Amino acid sequence: MNTKTTFNSSLVDLGKYIKTPSEATACQWELVTLPEQSGSDLPGPTDYVVLIAVIKMTKAFDVTYPQLKLMQNPMPIQSAFVRPWLSGGASNVLLGINKENILAYEFGPLTNAPSKVSMALPFDGGVVVYVEYLSPE
């Protein structure tokens, strides 16, 4: 398993994938492919392509994203998508879907490309955005 802790912290680069709010002050994000490469130069099959982002904002989530609708049955997130660089609060909301009282909002209207699943998960430190572009059928 790859344990690299690299992430991108550019709001401009993140804006290529999602519409970033003007209230955003900082971000950490990574485009994750699974299975992860194990050091080989040979490409292997990719089952998942997912964007994981944490956005910090100057205003509360409901003020920044009033247009997002609450999801009734959000899908659980596989633990492989909980990246080593995520804070405890961000990790907890990703792992806590369907286990605790975690709110998930449909994020599809704010993605810049078609996605299978897209969610925004607010927490005390900001919002975690999960956008799944490719997954096994």
Image (spheres, rainbow, N blue to C red):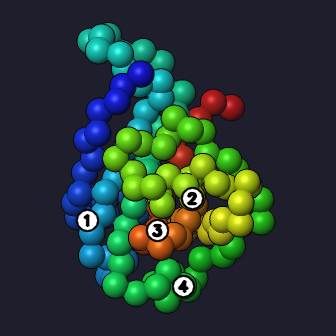
Disc ID at residue 11: 1
The relative height of residue 42 versus residue 15 in the rendered view (above or below) is: above
Give coordinates of residue 42: x percent, y percent.
32, 10
Q: Which residue is mark 3?
A: 127
Mark 1 touching mark 4, by CB under 8 A? no
- Which secondary structure, mark 2? helix
Mark 2 or mark 4, which is nearer the start of the sequence? 4
Residues at circles 4 and 2 in contact by the CB criterion of under 8 Å: no
Q: Quadrant of the N terminus?
A: top left
Of the numbered discs 1 and 4, the one sitting upstream in the chain is 1
Which amino acid does the dot numbered 4 rest on?
Asp
Foreground mark, 2 or 3, reads 2
- Residue for point 35% across, 72% down: 56
Which amino acid does the dot numbered 1 rest on? Leu
Q: Earlier in the sequence, mark 4 or mark 3?
A: 4
| Rendered image quadrant of residue 11 | bottom left
Point out which mark residue 93 bears: 2
For the C terminus, give its image quadrant.
top right
From the viewer's perspective, tell me whether residue 104 is left or right of residue 14: right
* Residue 90, x across and y down, in percent: 47, 58
Task: Give the alpha-carbon distance from disc 4 to disc 2, as whole Å.
Answer: 17 Å
Residue closer to the observer: 12 or 3? 3
Mark 2 or 3, nearer chain start? 2
